[in-house]
Image: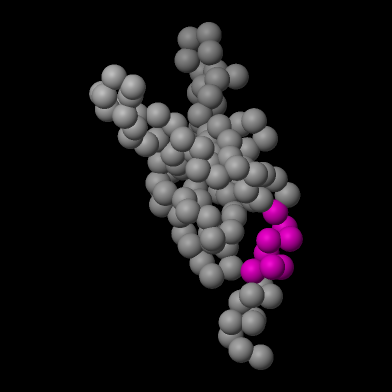
Amino acid sequence: MSVYNIFFKAKSAVERLYDRAATIQRYEAYQKPNGADGMQWVTKHENVPCRLSSVGMQTLNNASQDDANIIKYDVKVFLSSDIDVRAGDVFVIDGVRYESAKEPFVYITHQEVLLVRKGYA
C-alpha cells in the first residue's frame, strides 16, 4: 500500500466527522458602475462540510460593557484541505458569523482555521 493510499483513506475518515456546513466569504475589491473602486464581501464557498471545536476555556472573554454583554471567544474549524481559505475570511456556520483569526494550518488530510466569534448577548 502506497503512502498516497494511506493518506487518502485517512482523509476520507476525517471528512466523515464533519457535522456542519459553512459559507466562506472574502472582502474583495470591485469596480462600481460609476467606475470608482470599492470593497465588498464576496461568497467564495457555500455548504462546505466542516466541524467546530472549542479551543479552550482560557480563550473565553465575555465582558460587560454598560448595558450590553460583549461575547468574544475563539473556536477552531476543521475542513477539507482542498478549500481555499485565507486570513481575514469570514465563516458563517449555523447562522453564526466567525472571523478568521489567522492563516489556516493545512495538512494532507484536512486544514484547521482559528476563528473568533464576536457579538453581543
Residue 65: give x, y in percent of width and height: 47, 15
- Name the dominant secondary structure of the magenta segment: helix
Residue 48: give x, y in percent of width and height: 62, 48
Residue 21: give x, y in percent of width and height: 67, 44
Q: In which quarter of the image is the C terminus?
A: top right
Write down the region rendered in magenta: 11-18
Residue situated in front as seen by the camera: 83 or 61:
83
Does 113 sit above or below residue 120?
A: below
Q: In this view of the protein, can residue 57 be seen by the observer?
A: no
Does 30 sit above or below residue 102?
A: above
Residue situated in front as seen by the camera: 46 or 93:
46
Q: In this view of the protein, can residue 97 be seen by the observer?
A: yes
Does 41 sit above or below residue 106?
A: above
Q: Quadrant of the N terminus?
A: bottom right
- Residue 14 forms part of the magenta stretch: yes
Q: Which residue is drawn at 33% across and 34% down?
A: 29
